[in-house]
Amino acid sequence: MNKWYRIGLISALLPLVMGTGIFGAWVFTRQDWLMSAGIYTIAGGLILFVAGVVAVFFIARLAKKQGLPCKKKIITLACLLVANFPVAMWMTFSALDILAEYKVSIINNSTESAQIIFSDPTGKIHAVPDVSPHSKTQMIFHFEGEGAVMYQVTSKTFDRSGTLFGYITNGMGGSAVLEIQEVEIGRASCRERV
């Protein structure tokens, strides 16, 4: 029975530990090969789940034959095996959410505080807190829809608008820099870099 318990424990813990390690490494490094490793871990986890269920079945069968108490072992293994599914789903949806992020760096090289809004293709407005003069900030957005993301920069003396992303599509993510440069007092230019 101990052999089956070890098989069940390995079947439950191996994908849980490997998946968590791969996900954590991917969050910090964003290496593409780790996404593939995560997909293979999910596939391997399904195979190990079946092996774990077989192990639980044999533990229960042997315990019944030998009259040994093993309810605690069976419940522990079953909970560990089932825990793999919500953990894998959470990691998958978290990865999809991270991949859909749009990182926007805003550099205000003007002498005035700037108010900025972005509008995504669905028309949803994303307001940015005031950006102080001669400062930088980075924000993360989840723009939706398919099309252009527009910006509008206003201050006491200037008002500029333009295109931040020429075309986006749901779930793709990206990054851009919006730089506000003062040309002369009362006039500013905005430059976008994707």
Image: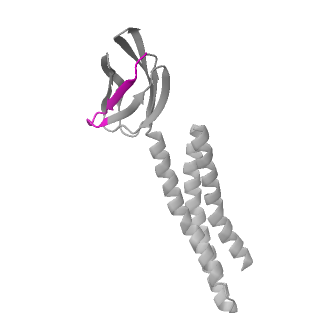
Q: Residue at x 37, y 13 (%)?
A: 189
Q: Is residue 103 above or below residue 45?
A: above
Which quarter of the rendered picture does the N terminus lie within? bottom right
Residue lying farthest to the left in this orientation: 123
Residue in front for this viewpoint, 46 or 177: 177
- Whether residue 159 appears in magenta in the rendering, the answer is no
Residue lying farthest to the bottom in this orientation: 67
Res. 194 visible in picture: no
Q: Position of residue 128 (x, y in %)?
A: 38, 32
Q: Residue at x 60, y 69 (%)?
A: 80
Q: Residue at x 54, y 68 (%)?
A: 82
Res. 18 visible in picture: yes
Q: Is residue 89 above or below residue 189?
A: below
Magenta residues? 111-125
- Asked whether, in this view, residue 68 is left or right of residue 132, the answer is right
- Asked whether, in this view, residue 57 is left or right of residue 127, the answer is right
Q: Position of residue 22 (x, y in %)?
A: 62, 48
Q: Is residue 182 above or below residue 130?
A: above
Q: How is the image coloured?
A: one colour
Residue lying farthest to the right in this orientation: 2
Residue in front for this viewpoint, 41 or 175: 175
Residue in front for this viewpoint, 13 or 111: 111
Q: Position of residue 110 (x, y in %)?
A: 43, 16
